[in-house]
């Protein structure tokens, strides 16, 4: 990667109102471009809001839909990462993140893990993605994840091993109140998770969370950037909208990977072998070796 | 696990300043997305409505908060003077409406009713006034029921349980008290025994048969931490209390949900017609 300046678009989208949200994106992108940012990242479902339920099919658009034209135009000035309800082939609706640059789609990531427990209903509304692919951005190798994806360790691991040097995590992290010493709960939990992930994968982690309130649920904000050593280098406030700018230096990544060559030392054969064994256990599949020995069949 | 997040171990601890920030933003955003500008609430002189008034006056201009003080003949004088303290302290708009003629009128028309039913009539008379004033002021009605009351079903359906938005419905009474201290709610309100004030010397804790401090710890364990009956008993609660409280929660579920609609069509309100309350706002 080369050095880049990233803007964290910590916004409060209007629920179900794509037009209003396009304008919010456009204004923030223009401001970030004026301040010299190379790219601006927005939260998960930044074009629609989160508590969608039956609004999902009503708001779904293909990534090349003319309604998104203002953002394609904005991407001539500054690269954009944002979240939307994507209508994919077969009329499947995905909770997607997209990277736009110079008027074209560079990458689309479909959320892999759809939380469907407690207060979350995503598995009911969305189809799940099935690819964790890194991509080459204009400034270097990167990856996109959406919220819950980060809570599954293999996602960041897969992206880092393909080459991602910066991982963007677009989020709609709700607060569950505030307890003493832990401030707004979602903020401290995500900070820990991102720091740990950055340390394990020696990558830059760019986390953008939304703010605002929908149907009583308050989203925590607290967007942040963690360097490949796991250090927080920038953090937006909890609860309020903000547009902080952060410089990501390639030299820091190089140093981290020199000091901690964890990716280099990864044992893929070990993982592959154990994964095969885990699959057999989980799905109760026959062990080909054991069967051969037992039955005497060659 | 001492380092687990609070909700997992049933703690009632909260950070009052961050909680107040979350709740004031909630009030501000839920109000303004409707296109309305003002808030109306019933101010009883008790701690719950006082806390809601303090949050409201912090969320929007105090003059846009309209408090209704609605005493009945039997209401305590202290309640009214405590409510007036809140009004004076916050500089919010207020009016006092004696509901005695409304309640007397009800009894005259509908016949005399016992103490509990009369309490319900009072709660619904107050609700009627609040919703009327909400039209006058272009306001949303703020709810003032706390999580303890909601879970125990200790409130009147379509009475004090009625509101447009409720900032304290996810806070147990103990937590409301903690927040009240932080917000600067007057001592006289924070110190007096909790009462619905429907008749003289009514006392919530005597009526319920347990203290809020105790039942809140139990509720935090059963509800928030999803602990089993056995774990609650092991934690020191009597089987009678655990079972009594559980029964109350189950039997009052109807008070916490909209009316049940019989499903006839392929898309029914309440089951598969699913839109957010904040639809297009």
Image (cartoon, rainbow, N blue to C red):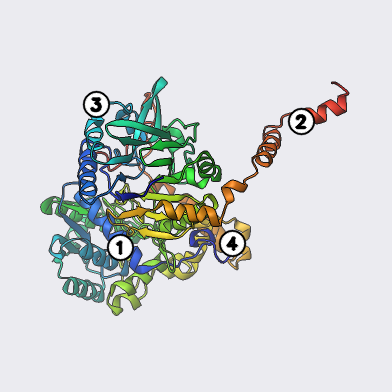
Task: Return the residue at label 1.
Answer: B21
User: Could you give the CA–CA distance between mark 2 and mark 3, rounded to whole angstroms?
Assistant: 52 Å
Q: Residue at x 33, y 56 (%)?
A: B117
Task: Return the residue at label 4.
Answer: B232
B182 left or right, relative to A279: left
Give the mark nearer the N terminus: 4 vs 1.
1
Q: Residues within 10 Å of mark 1 (few under 14, many from 20)?
A: some
**Image quadrant in which the N terminus of chain B is located:** bottom right
The residue closer to the viewer here, A4 or A27, is A4
Residue B70 position within the rendered picture, expressed as x and y whole percent measured from the top left: 20, 64
Q: Are marks 2 and 3 in contact (CB under 8 Å)?
A: no
Give the mark nearer the N terminus: 2 vs 3.
3
**B242 vs A278: above or below:** below
**A106 vs A190: above or below:** above
Task: Return the residue at label 2.
Answer: A287
User: Could you give the CA–CA distance between mark 4 and mark 1, rounded to whole angstroms?
Assistant: 32 Å
User: Could you give the CA–CA distance between mark 2 and mark 1, rounded to whole angstroms?
Assistant: 57 Å
Q: Are marks 3 and 4 on the same chain?
A: no
User: Could you give the CA–CA distance between mark 4 and mark 2, rounded to whole angstroms?
Assistant: 45 Å
Task: Return the residue at label 3.
Answer: A66
Is residue B271 visible to the viewer in this orientation of the structure?
A: no
**A75 vs A242: above or below:** above
Is residue A38 visible to the viewer in this orientation of the structure?
A: yes
Q: Are marks 1 and 3 in contact (CB under 8 Å)?
A: no
**B2 vs A227: above or below:** below
Marked residue chain, label 4: B
Q: Nearer the viewer, mark 2 or mark 1?
A: 2
Marked residue chain, label 3: A
Q: Are marks 4 and 1 on the same chain?
A: yes
Residue A33 position within the rendered picture, expressed as x and y whole percent measured from the top left: 23, 46
């Amino acid at each position: 990667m080369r050095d880049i300046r990233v803007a964290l678009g910590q916004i409060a989208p209007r629920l179900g109102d794509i037009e209003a949200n396009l304008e919010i994106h456009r204004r923030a992108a223009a401001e970030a471009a004026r301040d010299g940012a190379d790219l601006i990242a927005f939260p998960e479902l930044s074009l629609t809001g989160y508590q969608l339920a039956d609004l999902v099919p009503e708001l779904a658009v293909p990534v090349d839909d003319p309604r998104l034209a203002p953002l394609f135009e904005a991407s001539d000035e500054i690269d954009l990462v944002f979240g939307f309800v994507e209508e994919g082939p077969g009329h499947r609706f995905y909770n997607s993140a997209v990277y736009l640059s110079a008027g074209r789609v560079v990458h689309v990531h479909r959320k892999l893990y759809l939380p469907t427990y407690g207060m979350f209903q995503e598995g009911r509304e969305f189809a799940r993605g099935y690819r964790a692919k890194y991509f080459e951005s204009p400034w270097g190798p990167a990856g996109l994840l959406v919220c819950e994806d980060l809570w599954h360790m293999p996602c960041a691991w897969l992206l880092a091993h393909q080459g991602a040097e910066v991982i963007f995590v677009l989020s709609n992290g709700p607060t569950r109140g505030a307890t003493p010493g832990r401030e707004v709960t979602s903020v401290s939990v995500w900070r820990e998770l991102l720091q740990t992930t950055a340390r394990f994968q020696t990558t830059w982690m760019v986390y953008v969370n939304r703010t605002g309130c929908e149907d009583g649920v308050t989203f925590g904000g607290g967007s942040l950037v963690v360097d490949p050593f796991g250090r927080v280098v920038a953090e937006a406030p909890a609860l309020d909208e903000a547009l902080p700018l952060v410089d990501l230096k390639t030299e820091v990544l190089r140093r981290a990977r020199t000091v901690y060559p964890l990716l280099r030392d990864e044992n893929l054969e070990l993982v592959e072998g154990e994964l095969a064994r885990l699959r057999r256990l989980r799905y109760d599949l026959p062990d080909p070796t054991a069967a051969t020995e037992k039955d005497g069949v060659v | 696990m001492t380092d687990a997040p609070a909700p997992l171990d049933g703690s009632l601890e909260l950070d009052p300043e961050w909680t107040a920030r979350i709740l004031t933003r909630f009030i501000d955003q839920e109000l303004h997305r409707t296109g309305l500008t003002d808030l109306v609430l019933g101010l009883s002189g008790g701690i719950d409505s006082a806390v809601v008034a303090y949050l409201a006056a912090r969320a929007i201009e105090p003059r846009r908060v309209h408090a209704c003080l609605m005493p009945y003949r039997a209401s305590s004088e202290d309640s009214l003077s405590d409510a007036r303290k809140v009004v004076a302290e916050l500089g919010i708009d207020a009016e006092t409406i004696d509901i005695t003629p409304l309640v007397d009128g009800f009894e005259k028309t509908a016949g005399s009713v016992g103490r509990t039913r009369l309490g319900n009539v009072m709660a619904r008379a107050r609700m009627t006034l609040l919703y009327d004033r909400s039209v006058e002021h272009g306001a949303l009605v703020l709810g003032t029921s706390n999580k303890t009351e909601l879970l125990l079903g200790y409130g009147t359906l379509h009475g004090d349980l009625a509101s447009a938005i409720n900032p304290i419905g996810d806070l147990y009474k103990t937590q409301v008290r903690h927040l009240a201290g932080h917000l600067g709610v007057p001592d006289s309100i924070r110190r007096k025994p909790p009462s619905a004030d429907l008749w003289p010397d009514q006392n919530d804790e005597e009526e319920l048969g347990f203290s809020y401090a105790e039942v809140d710890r139990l509720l935090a364990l059963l509800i928030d931490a999803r602990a089993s009956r056995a774990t609650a008993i092991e934690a020191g609660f009597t089987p009678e209390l655990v079972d009594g409280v559980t029964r109350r929660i189950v039997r009052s579920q109807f008070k916490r949900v909209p009316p049940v609609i019989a499903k006839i069509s392929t898309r029914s309100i309440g089951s598969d017609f699913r839109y957010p309350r904040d639809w297009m706002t």
